[in-house]
Image (cartoon, grey):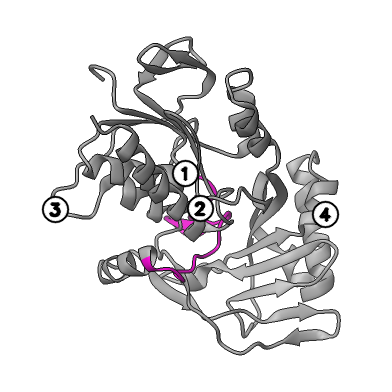
Amino acid sequence: MTGIPDVLMVGAGLAGLAAARDLARAGHTVHILEKSRGVAGRAATRRLELDGRVVPIDHGAQYFTAKNAPLRILLPDLVQHGLVREWAQGFPVLKPSGIKARRPGHPRYICPDGMSTLGKVFLQGWEAYDQPLPLEVEALVTGVQKATDGWTVTLEDGSTRSGRALVLNMPAPQALKLTQGQLKPEVQMALQAVRYAPCWAAILVPRQLPYLDWVGLEIEHPVLAWAALDHTKRAAPEPAVLVLHASPEWSQAHLELDPDEALRQIIEAAQELFGDWIGQCRTAMAHRWRYALPTQTHPWPYLAQENLVFCGDWCGGPRIEAALESGWASADYLVEYLRP
C-alpha cells in the first residue's frame, strides 16, 4: 500500500464492507484490516468437506430481511445474479405443547453459497466499474493512536497502518478497549451502554434425517432457541445438515465451556426434543459467538468522534439489515467529513 488512504477500516464485517464500498464509489481510497481469514463477520459460513465436496454451512447469522428501501433496492440485482434467494416467510415455533404454525410474514433471504457471500459481494463489487476493495486478512489490531494527519493503528506483529479517518467495525466492547483514553466522555458512555447476548452454535451432520416439515424452527426451551435444516438453502441438498443455536440465557451461563462439552450438552437437549437420531452424527462441532446479538443498541446508525467512526449491527438495531444501514450511514457521514 502506498500513501495514506482516506479511510482505514478495522473489521470486515458487513457494516464495514458496505461503508467501504460506498466510500470507494465516492472516490475515496479505503484500506481494510481483518483479524480472521474471511469476511462478513457473524454472517459466517463454515465449509466442510463431506462426501467428496465442500459444503457451505451457516453457523452464524441464518438469514436476512429487506424491510427498508436501501436493501430492497439492491436485492433484485443480488437475486438476478443467483447470489440471494428467498428461503422462507417466517418459521413455526416449538413450544412445550408442540410445534405451532404461524401465518406467512415478510420474506427471509439466504445466500445459496453461504451467508458470507454477502460480504464477498461488497468486497468485490457488483457494478461494472467496481474494483475489489484492498483487504489485509489475519491482521489483528492491538492499538489505536491519534496522529497529526489522521489515525494510526498497530498490528499484532508490531507494524502500523494509517488513514486520514478511522472506522472501527467491531463489537462495541472491543472498540471501547482499543480506544480507551482517546474518547470524549459522551462517546465512551455510548459504547459502554451497548449490551450483547452470546450464543453457542452447533453444526450436526446426522447419519439419517427423519422427515421434518420445516426449514427453520424457533424453540422455546431452556437450552435451545433455534434449529435450521441448513441443507435446504443449497442447490445440492445433500448431505443433510442441522444447525442449532442455544438460548441466550444458557449461552451466557455456559459461556466458558469447552466446545466439546458445550456440544455434548446441546446434543443432549436436542435429543430430548427431536429424538435419539440427533446424537448419531457423522460430524459435529460447536462454535461460541461471544457477541452474537446486540440486546441494547446505540440509537443511531453510527457513532462518530470527528474522523473516528464506529459502526456495526449494534448501531440503530441488530441483524444484518441494520448492519448494512449502519455502514451506508457511516459512509455518508465520512463523505461529508472528508469533503475538501
Q: Residue at x 44, y 58 (%)?
A: 114
Residue receiving disc 4: 250
Q: Is residue 155 visible?
A: no
Residue 312 in picture, x, y percent from top left: 52, 45
The answer for how far apart the CA atoms under marks 4 and 1 are is: 26 Å
The answer for how far apart the CA atoms under marks 2 and 3 are is: 25 Å
Q: Disc 4 marks which amino acid?
A: Trp
* Disc 2 and disc 1 in contact, CB within 8 angstroms: yes
Read off the magenta span. Answer: 40-69
Q: Residue at x 38, y 64 (%)?
A: 71
Q: Earlier in the sequence, mark 2 or mark 4?
A: 2
Q: Disc 1 marks which amino acid?
A: Gly
The answer for how far apart the CA atoms under marks 1 and 3 are is: 23 Å
Q: Earlier in the sequence, mark 4 or mark 1?
A: 1
Residue receiving disc 2: 43
Q: Disc 3 marks which amino acid?
A: Ala
Residue receiving disc 3: 128
Mark 3: which secondary structure?
A: loop
